[in-house]
Amino acid sequence: MRGTMEFDLETLFTIANTWILPGWLLLLFAPSWKYTGRIVFYLIILTLAITYAVLLFGDLGSFDPEAGSSLAGLAQAFSSPKAILIGWVHYLAFDLFAAMVIALDARRIGVNRLLMVVPLFFTLMTGPFGLLLYALIRYGYTRKLAVPFPEVISIPPLSGKSE
């Protein structure tokens, strides 16, 4: 029989996995809807961020800031179900955030919506690999090595000249 804490963590895991689905569906099927970005960011991602913060800081006695300073320390830190859940919620939130940026940027530059199924699927399943696929698609559409949403993120182009 599982303990109460383990059951609660398993329940949170299930809720978090279910919680992200509407966001992914909105990004895939309704990226042009004016409320998609707001719902995905403010309702879904920030709820995951709050969950993450509560899990991370709810038990400060077990928090070890040195855990990530070595691979062995990280393996030790992720040996508990709670730590795995914290890491999983982290992945869910940031992968969905990356997907939101990808979907909204693709809409802005006019990437074919059917083509967007590929990088969004891989962002959901593999995170950074989906982002890499989108970067390649983005380059194919724009022929520029620019950052998505350049009006928000000001990074000089590789040549040092403004685009």
Image: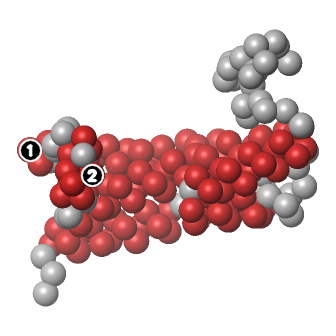
Q: Which residue of the protein is positioned furthest toward the bottom in this rendering?
A: 1
Which color mode does the image show? Answer: secondary structure
Q: Which residue of the protein is positioned furthest toward the top in this rendering?
A: 161
Image coords of residue 140 (percent x, y)? 88, 46
Q: What amino acid is found at the position of numbered circle 2 in the picture?
A: Leu
Question: Badge 1: few (under 14), some or many (20 or more) residues near its Cα, within 10 Å?
Answer: few
Q: Which mark is residue 61?
A: 1
Q: Give left or right: position of 110 versus 90.
A: right
Label 2 with label 1: CB-CB less than 8 Å = no
Q: Which mark is residue 71?
A: 2
Q: Is residue 32 something one can see in this rendering?
A: no
In the rendered image of this protein, does residue 121 appear above or below residue 96? below
Q: Secondary structure under badge 2? A: helix
Q: Is residue 38 something one can see in this rendering?
A: yes
Image coords of residue 40 (percent x, y)? 61, 49
Say which label, 2 or 1, has the lower sequence index: 1
Q: Give left or right: position of 20 versus 27.
A: left
Q: Residue at x 18, y 39 (%)?
A: 66
Q: What amino acid is found at the position of numbered circle 1 in the picture?
A: Gly
Q: Residue at x 76, y 21 (%)?
A: 157
Q: Residue at x 86, y 63 (%)?
A: 114
Image coords of residue 14 (percent x, y)? 40, 71
Q: Which residue of the protein is positioned furthest toward the left in this rendering?
A: 61
Q: Residue at x 68, y 50 (%)?
A: 132
Question: Badge 2: few (under 14), some or many (20 or more) residues near its Cα, within 10 Å?
Answer: few
Q: Foreground: 160 or 18?
A: 160
